Image (cartoon, coloured by chain):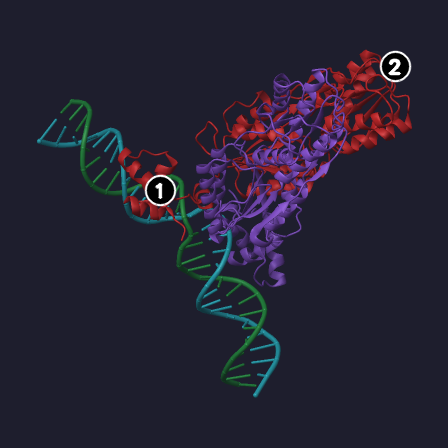
Chain colours: A red, B purple, C green, D cyan
Amino acid sequence: MTVTLADVAARAQVSPATVSRVLNGNYPVAATTRERVLRAVDELDYVLNGPASALAAATSDLVGILVNDIADPFFGIMASAIQAEIGGPGGRAGGERLAVTCNTGGSPERELTYLTLLQRQRAAAVILTGGAMENAPHAAAVAAKLRKLADAGTRVVLCGRPPAPDTDAVALTFDNRGGGKQLTEHLIGLGHRRLGYIAGPEERTTTRHRLEGHRAALAEAGIEEDPRWTVHGRYDRRAGYEATLELLRRDPTLTAVVAANDSVALGACAALRESGLRIPADVSVAGFDDLPFSIDAVPSLTTVRLPLAEAGARAGRIAMGREEPPPGGIATVRGELMVRGSSGVPRT
Amino acid sequence: MTVTLADVAARAQVSPATVSRVLNGNYPVAATTRERVLRAVDELDYVLNGPASALAAATSDLVGILVNDIADPFFGIMASAIQAEIGGPGGRAGGERLAVTCNTGGSPERELTYLTLLQRQRAAAVILTGGAMENAPHAAAVAAKLRKLADAGTRVVLCGRPPAPDTDAVALTFDNRGGGKQLTEHLIGLGHRRLGYIAGPEERTTTRHRLEGHRAALAEAGIEEDPRWTVHGRYDRRAGYEATLELLRRDPTLTAVVAANDSVALGACAALRESGLRIPADVSVAGFDDLPFSIDAVPSLTTVRLPLAEAGARAGRIAMGREEPPPGGIATVRGELMVRGSSGVPRT
DNA sequence: GACCGTATAGAAAGCGCTTGCTGCGTTGCT
DNA sequence: AGCAACGCAGCAAGCGCTTTCTATACGGTC
């Protein structure tokens, strides 16, 4: 029924070994023989059996990319850049690899299960993107998994994620703390003294780091933070909308709202607008990430640009062994403050 | 080095066959034996070798999802819904499957290569999302591939993509034509007579169908279309921005701009605004898809909502054999006109 | 008490491919 | 001319698992 290597071999009048070598091209084969084999492959429309090959060679061409939310462009952009670099079809390196994106939905269990599935498939590399869960047992479990993967020869790269201790995983970490600080410093510089902060889910590293940066800026400016000024929520528009209403309820005198990311900021803008407040005349708004739509918000969003695509591409190259990992296996990727229309001098 | 089935068997003092059966749970094994085996699995931290298992069983737990652009939420949302339904980790069905998303970047070759890669892995199912290329040889090649995949037992589902002729692939098709028509009818109803249209790339089915709907509405209203009113471009914001400037240059008297999708519409809004035109007072704008950010545009975008998540979920269920395919293998999914602030009565 | 059906475990034959090693024919060198 | 060296192809032994078929041990039945 299905065509096998042996069929091709028979047709080309060579041994299966030769066919395999032609296909893998890592062993000298005479040009005429190679041609004969390739013709047979073509005529029979032969497709290599991946599992069999992976079993025999003890390696596979699968590369896994773990994302928290595939519907979020933040991850989509990174995944896209990674995948482009992994090669897969059209990639530069001849070795065709199947770059696959796995959606954890931010769930620790899923993350672990996908890691196991990837381990089971003997993946060539695994790239984890975005913030990690701040949950000791889970973090330990992930670290253990990563160690096991590395032991089995799988390259592990973290992209936009803090380093995993006790692991030799390469980490390209976003400077969320620094970015958050810069952003709030900008707002403080404009004269804001009462700033609301819409943070992401509590247990994410990204959430904590951005918030820390914000607080560091406040502290340095000698501004005492009111606990009512911080609200936690998911990383989406809806959460931003609701959190803003809540902030407004708690303290209507706020002159600025800093959001955990751009989607949240958009929701915040909607809530402010519906509350009859002008941006930035009445309240300034700031986001984080600088996703493509941020510039189209009205007014356009002041935010921190993260080089998502660049970081993804680099992570991809490192995972493919085409680029040296940074010294110490850890690199910090900084964001860039993008001052736009949504932030302004506070009303006096 | 790595733990194998045999190691587990030895530790549990049973035969490898028994361990396999415990793991697959499709054969009676005494409770006490099962327990012993599971304990051994746990103690040895055993992970099944995917390729070996796939080879022996001639099936795999991989499910492929092909998307044109993973960075575009249009695809992200569908992929997310599919993946949630496929189960993978956390899914309802016990059978854990690795749902993987492959990014074709809209390239025919990549699409084909990914299909081959998936075929090579003996994927359990393949889901193709979004518009197809309108290129006869390529379409034939894809159809041939799909036929071969189906022959090999892979379930093939198209989601938001036109049916593939001569293929028994199940198709959940978006009614792009109908949606486009409705949208333009709405604009015409408001009184618009000179409508610019920013279409997507020429060779996509989505592009053509939406444009056809637009033109059908014009024709029915007895409006003769000026060829200068249509511009083609990519499906992104940038293209929308540039196309709008071009449209304005060609005919400054246009009172409405219909965009191929929401991202394009956003770019159009930016261009109009920068050109000193008010929306919708001077020019109305409409998008397509109703992606989450569309409601946050200012003014919010009039568009056609496509039930991306629902369609994705359904496609996922069908791919898993958990839902009956529609009669004839083809179902049309309609969009819903969302009238919002970006469309209004034209200036007179 | 011999016989049989049932429940459970094991033996062993692959699944389709890779690769170390062997073998042969040819070229290069002295 | 003789021998080493080399280039290229084949043999065969797995890779780790699934699954068919067979074997064993019961318990029950007539």
Query: As drawn, is A176 to the left or to the right of B149?
Result: right
Q: Is residue B268 visible?
A: yes
What element does badge 2 sit on?
loop
**Residue drawn at (70%, 32%), measured in percent from left and top?**
B188
Quarter in which the C terminus of chain B is drawn: top right
Instruction: Identify whether A34 is placed above or below D28.
Output: above
Residue farthest along the front direction in this orientation: B222
State the image coordinates of residue B150 (x, y, percent, origin top left).
49, 50
Q: Based on the displayed image, in which of its 4 quarters is residue A132 positioned?
A: top right
Amino acid residing under circle 2 = Arg
State the image coordinates of residue A318 (x, y, percent, origin top left).
54, 26
State the image coordinates of residue B145 (x, y, percent, origin top left).
46, 44
Q: Is residue A50 visible?
A: no
Q: Identify the residue position indicated by label 1 in the image.
A: A41
Instruction: Identify whether A323 is placed above or below B148.
Output: above
Q: Identify the residue position indicated by label 2 in the image.
A: A347
Instruction: Identify whether B39 is placed above or below A112.
Output: below
Query: As drawn, is A137 to the left or to the right of B10?
Result: right
